[in-house]
Image (cartoon, helix red, strand yellow):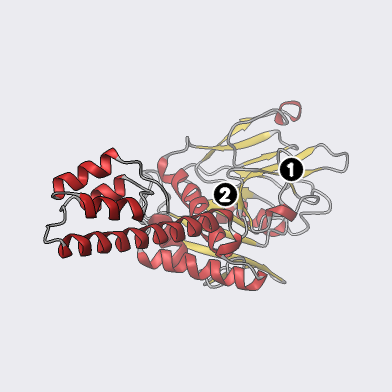
Amino acid sequence: MTQYHVSALPRPAPYGESEPESLQFPGCRPVRISRESIADYEGRIEYWDANTEVAMVCEPVSIYHEHPPQRLAGLLTTIAHVRGSPIETFGASDLLVRDARGAHLRIMQADQTVYLRPRATRPWGPAIEVGSDTLPDVVLEVDNTTDVRRGKLALYESWGFPEVWVEVPDTPSPSRPAGLRPGLTIHLLGDGGFHSAPSSRAFPGWTAAEIHRALNEPELSDATTAALRRVGGALGAAEGTGPDDDPFLRAERRAGHAAGRAEGRMEAQLAAVRQVFGARGLLAPAALPQRLAEMEGVSTEVLMQAALECRDKADFLRLLTDRPHGGG
């Protein structure tokens, strides 16, 4: 596969002191985008540099590449519900470095950007500006036709991104570089730069193996569900929040409690009607549970009156149909 290089560039003050002398973008092709045009450019790029006015553009996106970032957003929604506070993802966002005059100097696009505390830290402009905006807690890069280790990862490190996940999906693109093996690598920023770690720092206890499995399995397994609950619970415990602080889960629990009360009420009504029918030597209608479910809210008083007055089970059902249901 063709390799493209970008030669050494002036550092985007105050960043880039340790940037590499060359950046490689396997699987990309160079496209010229002028300084005047870049601010209005809305296409997908891997990297753009003002010095060369060259953007590195990768092959057209495919399901192989787009599925992991979308799946991650869904997984984090579940974790956020359990934690009891929101987590925001911003997809393939521009990561922008400006020069001393405020003009665009460098742009890199992530495949997925994650903010654990968006109420306080989310960006509000069209791009995440390195040096002024809070950087994402996690960035996800998907390598299928690319290899971020040879270019983008060095920039993430020199720009101070705290945690970068690099996912190589189980299902390969036909043009995947031979050196890429399925799996997820977690890169954590420390005093000496990035180092790989077995589990996330932003999502305590969520291991690289668990994240990779969650991004690739056709349907969420019991093991993945347990991991999401565990991670969400750990985040909530650290913040003093939980599922009852999440509006959706709080509403679901209330609905569940209401449904449980209604079910218990219907069971009590069924038992009372059957007792009256038994005392009168009659057989209770087999369709009674279904009819009670259809007549939601029918009062126990109406049921008892019909059970005492009816001639048989058919007459009982007719009486229920003819009478107002009442309440209670």
Residue bearing the label numbered 2:
112
**Residue 106 located left or right of residue 2:** right
Give the quarter of the image for residue 106. Answer: top right
**Residue 221 located left or right of residue 290:** right
**The N terminus - image quarter:** top left
Question: Tag 2: residue type?
Answer: Gln
Give the x, y percent position of residue 103.
82, 36
Q: Residues within 10 Å of mark 1 (few under 14, many from 20)?
A: few
Q: Residue at position x 71%, y 31% from top?
A: 38
Q: In front: 150, or 223?
A: 223
**Residue 25 located left or right of residue 305:** right
Q: Residue at position x 60%, y 47% from top?
A: 110
Give the x, y percent position of residue 287.
18, 50
Q: Residue at position x 81%, y 50% from top?
A: 132
Residue bearing the label numbered 1:
124
Note whether residue 34 is visible. yes
**Residue 73 located left or right of residue 311:** right
Q: In front: 245, or 205?
A: 245
Question: Tag 1: residue type?
Answer: Trp
Query: For the view shown, which residue lies furthest in the right direction?
Result: 101
Give the x, y percent position of residue 127.
71, 41
Give the x, y percent position of residue 260.
40, 61
